[in-house]
Amino acid sequence: MTSTRATLIQVAERAGVSLASTSRALHGTGASKAMVERVRAAAAELGYSADAIGRSLRLKKTSQIAFAVADIGNPVYVEIMRGIHEVLAPHGYRVVVMSTGDTAASTAELLHSLHGGFADGMIVIPLRTDDELIEQIGRAPVPVVVIGRAMSDRGISSVSTDSAAGIGAAVQHVVSLGRRRIGFLNGPLDTTPGSSRQRGFDEAVSAKDFAAQTDVEVAADFTVAAGIEAARKLLDRPHRPDAIVAANDLLAIGAIRAARELGLSIPHDVAVTGMDDTELGQVFLPRLTSVSLGSAERGRAAARLMLGLTDDAEAPARQISVGTELFVRESTRDSTPDQTAEDAE
């Protein structure tokens, strides 16, 4: 049988340009906009489609970067992914989203699968880490960038943010509003976010001038459902909190739901803050006061690190830190427009 499939040579002839120019135009690298339009028009006329598998084998490159997270439904990961795509797409890379599972071992197993050659690199947000996982990252056959904790001292390029300081800012905010019974709704303490955010709360309430009562409840996960269950326990205490500082927006939304079950008004009876400043928290009613951890910027920073490593796999590990910012909304103040912490205080 003979194939009638159009070839790259035929596309080049139809467009009236060189084979090399045709290849660059189709793959989005080093070609002008006019050239890209001309070549793609010729390809469309001929019904040409690139042989992606064959091209990958020839170039030893997939043009794919894996983005691996524990919960692909978490809105903060969606925002990070947008930042990654924004940087990588102009360089011809596709972003492939994968689930790590919620253990260090399952994340290490996913990293081991990189030996199969399905991606040119991986950006990963491990929920839990251990020495075995860190060693697996170091042995990966392609570049790996970690978001969530600083790892440059272990030879791993990473992007981090000071979520502990962010929790401190949220605590200071509710105290400045006159709240004196502060509940902290955290996620599992054996996770990277859980441990750092607990540290931030402990540091904030141990300050010499801190005068409020405190209580802590640890949710089973960083989800709305887990937040509802844990907040019910927190709100059922003898000294019910008049403010809840939650470790992420999903837990905060769960806390608001639990408070409403009891007929409590937000923020009159209970002020609630979140963390991550997700789009979901911004459209939820009441709109959520939340600490931004620069999700999109963390994604962009990780993607820039990845591009550097794909160009030079031997480049030294780099660490990028992204700042935090508290945005004040109706869940702590009635009918207030978006404000930063500095504006609000």
Image (tube, rainbow, N blue to C red):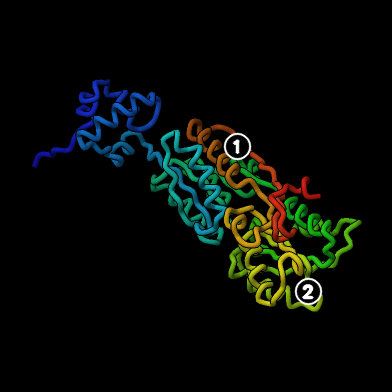
Relative to residue 206, is residue 66 drawn left or right?
Answer: left
Tell me the quarter of the image containing the N terminus: top left
Secondary structure beneath label 1: loop
Q: Which residue is mark 1?
A: 317
Left or right: residue 43 versus residue 199 is left
Relative vertical location of residue 269 with respect to residue 332 in this rendering, above or below? below
**Which residue is the site of mark 2?**
240
Instruction: Identify the amino acid type marked 2.
Output: Arg
At x 53%, y 43%, the residue is: 83
Give the vertical position of 158 relative to 105 (above or below).
above
Most extreme residue toward the front is 335
> Which badge, 1 or 2, is on the more N-terminal residue?
2
Q: Residue furthest right?
A: 208
Contact flag, marks 1 and 2 (Cβ < 8 Å): no
The residue located at (61%, 40%) in the rendering is 155
User: On residue 304, which mark appears?
Assistant: none
Nearest the eye: 47 or 150: 47
Q: Amino acid at mark 1?
A: Ala
- How far apart are the alpha carbons under marks 1 and 2? 47 Å
Q: Could you say where residue 77 lies in the image, as x and y percent from the top left?
A: 54, 52
Whether residue 163 is visible to the viewer of this picture, yes or no, is: no
Q: Is residue 122 visible?
A: yes
Residue at 85% in and 67% down = 213
